[in-house]
Amino acid sequence: MSVILCAGISVRSGTNFMGSIFSEIKSVDSLPKSTSKGEFPFFPDKTISHYQEWVRNFNSTFFASPAIDAKKMAPYFAKGFLDYLRHDFELEKKALFLKNPSLYNLEWFYEFFPEGKLIILTRSAPDLIASSLKASTLIRNSKSDFSKLKSKIKTRSGYNMYTYSKAYVKHTNQLLKLREELKGRYLEVKYESIVQEPEKYIRQIFEYANVEYTEQELQNAVNAKVVGSSYFGRKKHVQNWGKLEKTKDFKSIGRYKDWNWYNRFVYNRIARKSNALVGYDHKL
């Protein structure tokens, strides 16, 4: 089973949308099957450190020499994990699509999955930050009244604008690192490109991932429903993780155009340079 991993530059980068696209292809399995709603936490710091710690602990009492090498063992570890997924989730297809909205520790990707396909999804700083700001106003019934009030204060005071801008800089630095370490070994795609020219870029993605698809499946993917939209649906500001039809009201890029002077100032001061390094040119 070949692994296709879509990693986003950050949360709100569009990995759920990518999952919706791949769920239209019959030759590809997803987790959960057919929806790809869940994330794949294979590469966060905690997971990787636990794996490395297991190897170290094993080596500390292992009677043979030389000791187990974490990177040499990685593909065997991943194969066993995939065998488990195949059995437990009854996966039947040749390819498995997974996603994770983070770029950290992806230098390990080809250690675990030597034949895998890595797709990195970027999104412009203004669009990603605008999406995050909107998401920060969501109504979650599980939150206490104090938490809801604190969330509103963080948004209206400008604190969230500042922290999201700083976070974009951090994520950009990780992307630049991967561009050096994994140069030529992955496909980098802009979320905005998929939205503006879906057929062109979705076809490119499928070809890179080496998946079998029909022209009808391609058109279904082009018209894939929205997943995880914070701004879309009957109830405003309520998170909806189901698949929703795109209507004339759907707008996933350009929300930053109504920013106030403070948001524009913070973006220009903190995130504009990183936005350019990623490959965008937004002068606000």
Image: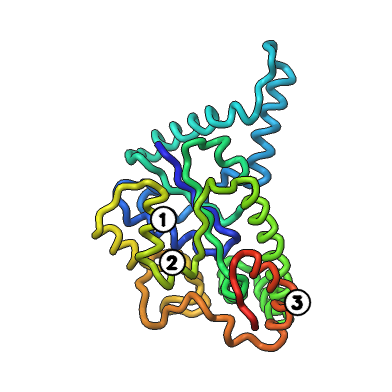
Q: What kind of residue is marked 2?
A: Ile
204 relative to 177 in the view: left or right: left
Q: Which residue is drawn at the image coordinates 27% and 58% (left, top)?
A: 217
| Mark 1 residue type | Ile
Query: How far from the left and from the top, in percent, is residue 224?
Result: 35, 65
Residue toward you, 10 or 233: 10
Q: Earlier in the sequence, mark 1 or mark 2?
A: 2
Q: In whole angstroms, how far apart are the C-alphas of marks 1 and 2? A: 10 Å
Mark 2 near mark 3, Cβ–Cβ under 8 Å?
no
Task: Find residue 266 and report its image quarter.
Answer: bottom right
Residue 194 is labelled as 2
Rendered location of residue 254, percent (x, y):
53, 80
Q: Residues within 10 Å of mark 3 (few under 14, many from 20)?
A: few
Q: Number of marks in the image?
A: 3
First reached walking from the N terminus: tag 2 or tag 3: 2
Return the residue at label 1. Answer: 205
Say whether residue 201 is left or right of residue 140: left
- Give the answer, above or below, for where 275 lies relative to 57: below
Badge 3 marks a residue whose secondary structure is: helix
Q: Please name the residue that numbered disc 3 is placed on.
A: 269
> What is the CA distance from the residue labelled 1 to the residue labelled 3?
34 Å
